[in-house]
Image (spheres, helix red, strand yellow):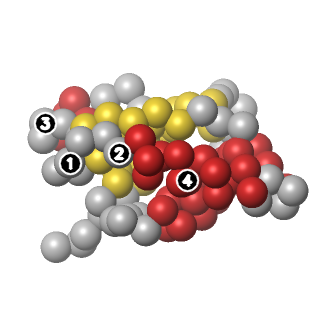
Amino acid sequence: MKAKKAKILIQSDKHETYVNVMAALCHKYDIKQIMLSFIDKKVDDAFINKIQSKLISLSSNPIYSKTSRISLKGETASNDHSILVRGWDILDVTGVSKK
C-alpha cells in the first residue's frame, strides 16, 4: 500500500476532535504526512501543539501510537477549492461546520 498524505480542515476549537480523526485515518491508511488547514484563521501553533501533546500522551495505545510519530504541519486554508485539495490523497472535513 502506498503511503498517503492527508489534509484535515480545522474549524472547530476542540482539539480532541482532530486527535481521534487522525488516529482513525492512520489506523486505516498508511499516512506519512498530515497537514492541518485552518479555515478563516491563521495557523495556530498552540492548537497544533495541543494535538501533538495529546497524541503523545495516548501513544501507549496502539491506535494512537503511529499517529503520535507523524509530524503535523499547519497552513491557512486557501479559498480556492482546487488549490485546497490538489496533491492530497485524503481530505477530512469532520470538524468543519456543515452549514
Residue at x 20% of width, y 48% of height: 41
Q: Amino acid at mark 4?
A: Ile
Residue 44 versus residue 33 in the image, above or below = below
- Look at the numbered discs 2 and 1 and tell me whether their residues touch, using CB distance below 8 Å: yes
1 or 3: tag closer to the N-terminus: 1
State how far apart marks 1 and 4 are (Cα). 17 Å
Where is residue 34? Give x, y as percent. Answer: 52, 37
Where residue 44 is drawn, which disc sits there? 2
Is residue 27 at all visible to an observer of this figure?
no
Numbered disc 3: secondary structure = loop
Residue 75 versus residue 48 in the image, above or below = above
Where is residue 51? Give x, y as percent. Answer: 55, 53
Side of 60 relative to 16 (left or right)? right
1 or 4: tag closer to the N-terminus: 1
Instruction: For label 4, count other residues whose C-alpha is less than 10 Å away and answer few (under 14), some (14-19) or many (20+).
Output: many
Instruction: For label 3, count other residues whose C-alpha is less than 10 Å away and answer few (under 14), some (14-19) or many (20+).
Output: few
Q: What residue is shown with label 4?
A: 51
Count numbered badges in the picture: 4
Q: What residue is shown with label 1?
A: 41
Numbered disc 1: secondary structure = loop
State how far apart marks 2 and 4 are (Cα). 11 Å
State how far apart marks 2 and 1 are (Cα). 8 Å
Q: Amino acid at mark 1?
A: Lys
Q: What residue is shown with label 3?
A: 80
Q: In the picture, residue 35 is in which quadrant?
A: top left
Numbered disc 4: secondary structure = helix
